[in-house]
Amino acid sequence: MTKLRLAIVGAGPAGIYAADILLKAERSFDVSIDLFDHLPAPYGLVRYGVAPDHPRIKGIITALRDVLDRGDIRIFGNVRFGTDLTLDDLKQHYNAVIFATGAVHDAELRIPGIDAEGSYGAADFVSWYDGHPDYPREWPLDAREVAVIGNGNVALDVARILAKHADDLLPTEIPANVYAGLKASPVTDVHVFGRRGPTSVKFTPLELRELGELRDVDMIVYDEDFDYDEHAQASVAGNKQIMVIDRVLQSWRARETGAASRRLHLHFYAKPTEVVTDASGRVSALRYERTRPDGQGGVVGTGEIRETPVQALYRAVGYFGSPLPGVPFDEKHGVIPNHEGQVINPDNNEQVYGVYATGWIKRGPVGLIGHTKSDAMETVEHLINDVGNWWTPAAPAEEAIVELLESRGIRYTNLDGWHALDEHEIALGAPEGRARIKVVDRDEMVRVSRRE
Ligand SMILES: Cc1cc2nc3c(=O)[nH]c(=O)nc-3n(C[C@H](O)[C@H](O)[C@H](O)COP(=O)(O)OP(=O)(O)OC[C@H]3O[C@@H](n4cnc5c(N)ncnc54)[C@H](O)[C@@H]3O)c2cc1C
């Protein structure tokens, strides 16, 4: 019987779902799957993107963990594709590879001053507060007034974490250095800016409503943003999600404010045009143009320029995928070019046999964790049907890849290692009555995982 030796690169939800779906799929061949990730722990953005005060979503880790705990997928953590392993290595050892490497970097926002001191990408900040091992431990939280640019859920995450009192984050899994940094923050005002109106936002009702429940934080919305045109009125009437968002915003308009020590402002119809800096080159204000509805759901500039003083600025304008050595890459969209997960050579539009993509690196950085499941189904279906076009590896034995990693001195982690790290983090949290405290240092993660 034919056997599919499959490598999956990326142990986020997309990679784990792809493995699970393939193992459960109807097929005429055996499967043996190795899952690689450059981080010592699995789960991708569920561990290092989803906000720590969203325990219900973090809980998806339990479902992903159940898949791994079945024991029919080998995982190799702390192995980076492109440096520790190449495409040629994979061709030597496997019949095919699925790339599920996601998108971890901030998309660009090209306005003057965006590179000033005090101007940050949301993805970097998220990586800091979620304890990603490859980001600095220290984060400069010295601004009283902060701007967040963007109207998606990541902008709301960043604004919420900045505005929330650190003690209210303590029951979560935030690392000790993150608690200390947030505790010392002098922030009083967080301003969120969106180019379009309240009925065109990309955030979801649940995430918006949550802002109104923050202790000692006033929600500030501005009456001038609620003069809806016909298009906006139709959106509210015709779309349940927008209706709920509108209801939440309207309730804040009616709320008494003034008693809280912190404020979270939502500015709509505000198109950022420049990050203003002081004499030392530090962020001192956000300059933006007031926009107005164009009648078709978009906006046009009014020419009116405004400025809000801020000492720090975060751009939350989307994520962007990174190229992988030897694998085609679409520079414009930050994805691996593909047809339903079959990777395509962009020069001739022909399929690159044996190479597949799934998740955010396939589709771009939009959508929830659940969407990576349907992605994986589509990709796996093609992989199964392409049986005649797989690679023919010279060294398909399961031990061969282990020998290769060991010959290169790569300190890989495995499923047992994840259990060790998981137990260690839970034990760290126990004396303080917390569910877990994350280990942030990569070497320490590897040491604990390898039980050294
Ligand atoms: C800030 C933020 C908050 C979010 N909150 C929510 C939420 O509340 N609810 C929700 O449903 N969705 C949320 N999402 C979306 C969700 O995280 C994504 O839909 C999902 O994680 C995408 O899965 P993925 O597996 O494609 O990518 P990822 O989760 O990014 O996983 C990719 C994996 O590939 C690995 N990798 C990358 N490059 C290499 C390489 N060269 N070699 C080896 N391994 C590599 C990475 O280490 C990572 O583990 C959020 C996203 C962000 C950014």
Image (cartoon, helix red, strand yellow):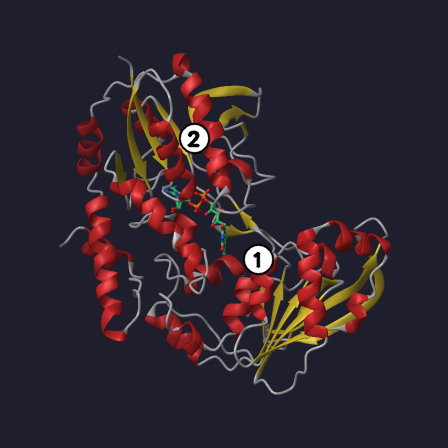
| Residue drawn where x is 64% and y is 59% of the image | 151
Looking at this view, is 446 or 12 the one in front?
A: 12
Label 1 CA crowd tier, 10 Å (few <14, some 14–19, many 20+): some
| Residue drawn where x is 67% and y is 59% of the image | 244
What x and y, as percent, mark residue 150? 63, 59
What x and y, as percent, mark residue 57? 44, 55
What x and y, as percent, mark residue 419? 22, 51
Looking at this view, is 437 or 59 the one in front?
A: 59
Q: Which is more N-terminal, label 1 or label 2? A: 1
Mark number displayed over residue 153: 1
Instruction: In the rendered view, tell whether residue 332 sits above or below residue 427.
Output: above
Task: Count the marks.
Answer: 2
| Residue drawn where x is 23% and y is 73% of the image | 431
Q: Quadrant of the C terminus?
A: bottom left
* Residue topped by disc 2: 326
Q: Is mark 1 within 8 Å of ligand 1?
A: yes
Circle 2 or circle 1, nearest the eye: 1
Q: Secondary structure at mark 1?
A: helix
Q: CA distance from mark 2 to mark 1?
A: 33 Å
Instruction: In the rendered view, tell whether residue 345 sits above or below residue 231.
Output: above
Look at label 2 and name its amino acid: Gly
Left or right of residue 340, residue 73 in this image: left
Which quarter of the figure has residue 183? bottom left
